[in-house]
Image (cartoon, rainbow, N blue to C red):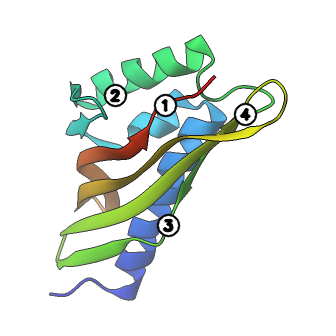
Amino acid sequence: MPLSPDDHFAVIDLLASYARAIDSGDADAYADNFLPDAVLDLVGGRRLNGRDEVREWVSGLIDSGHVGGDPATLRHFVGLPRIEGEGDRCTAQTYCVILDYDPARNIRSPLVGRYEDVIVKVDGAWRFQHRIIHGEISGRRD
């Protein structure tokens, strides 16, 4: 059975929830976007296995001040995804850009890339089963 329009909107909301959670510094909301046994492949080749590892990793970013600061100095922007699938499983490919600014308020882009996702619906909620973050352009220039 093809994905319904409601399923498409729910997947788009998942993608937005991911960005909102990391930018606001909410590690629990961020981790909740993933299934308990999910895999997250980060830029640079590091792999996180399971929701608990994902939560631990993002908590470290938050605690170090890299994300979720007040006032926020970093924002994740995601484009419109290409969603394909049927039933309770789909894939999504989404372009992304991260913007931040330096102390002089000069805007920088530490990452331009894309997300490649396998997303499944469990108990009526769409969650990431596998997310790969591709960084076509990455790195900070200070």
| Disc nearer the start of the sequence (3/4) | 4
Q: How many marks?
A: 4
Tell me which residue sits at (50%, 38%) in the image.
Answer: 29
The residue tagged 4 is 73
- The label on residue 54 is 2
**Horizontal and vertical percent position of residue 102:** 74, 28
| Disc nearer the start of the sequence (2/4) | 2
Is residue 40 visible in the rendered structure shown here?
A: yes
| Disc nearer the start of the sequence (2/1) | 1
**Horizontal and vertical percent position of residue 70:** 78, 27
Tag 2: Cα neighbours inside 10 Å, few (<14), some, or many (≥20)? many
| Disc nearer the start of the sequence (2/3) | 2
Is residue 49 visible in the rendered structure shown here?
A: no
| Disc nearer the start of the sequence (4/1) | 1
Give whichever of 64, 50 is nearer the camera: 64
Whether residues under marks 2 and 4 lie with C-beta atoms below 8 angstroms apart, the answer is no
